[in-house]
Amino acid sequence: MSFPYSPKNRSARRYLASVLAALIHVEDRDVVLSPDWQQLKQLNDIKLLHPLIQEVAQGSFRQKQPPAIQRSGWVVKSLEASLWAFHDADNFEEAVLKAANGRRRRHHRSDVRAVGWCVLGRIENPRIVAVGAGTDGNAE
């Protein structure tokens, strides 16, 4: 079981916050999710990510398909599943469907959805500054 202040959770939050910030600032998805992403190197220079989170950041989600992609309440699997659904989707609908279709247990739906709504909105409109905001920054 992961706890809110465990090293895995802290690393996952640091990595995901950096990914979201970069996407909000309209960095290219493929660049942001690359194992060679400069911000990932900076995160590790400041403090190494937990090895399991580092594995996800290095692209473990690219090598797997369900059932190897497991959605669970565990932060590592949730992060991996979210990035798997996002990394090669052509549009928002496809990414959400990928995130939702592997679900077998109802109590895990929020794991991917929380990240999905934040990250995946960028596919439809790369100029979105914040979730629920238009290209001018005002809520639509």
Image: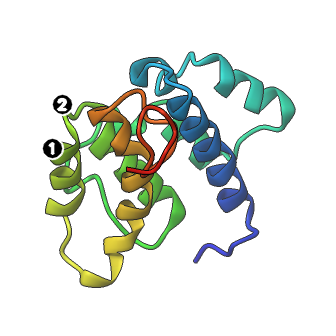
**Which one is in front, 88 or 52?**
88
The residue at the far right in this view is 46
Report the residue marked by disc 1.
94
Q: Is residue 1 left or right of residue 29?
A: right
Say what amino acid the circle numbered 1 marks: Glu
Residue 11, placed above or below residue 126: below
For image coordinates 41% across by 67% down, the residue present is 111
Res 125 → quadrant: top left
The residue at the far bottom in this view is 107
**Which one is in front, 22 or 55?**
22
Res 105 → quadrant: bottom left
Say what amino acid the circle numbered 2 marks: Asp
Q: Is the C-beta separation of discs 2 and 1 under 8 Å? A: yes
Q: Secondary structure at mark 1?
A: helix
Q: Residues within 10 Å of mark 2 (few under 14, many from 20)?
A: few
| The N terminus - image quarter | bottom right
Q: Which mark is residue 90?
A: 2
For image coordinates 27% across by 35% down, the residue present is 124
Image x and y of residue 140, in percent: 37, 50
For image coordinates 18% across by 30% down, the residue present is 90
Res 36 → quadrant: top right
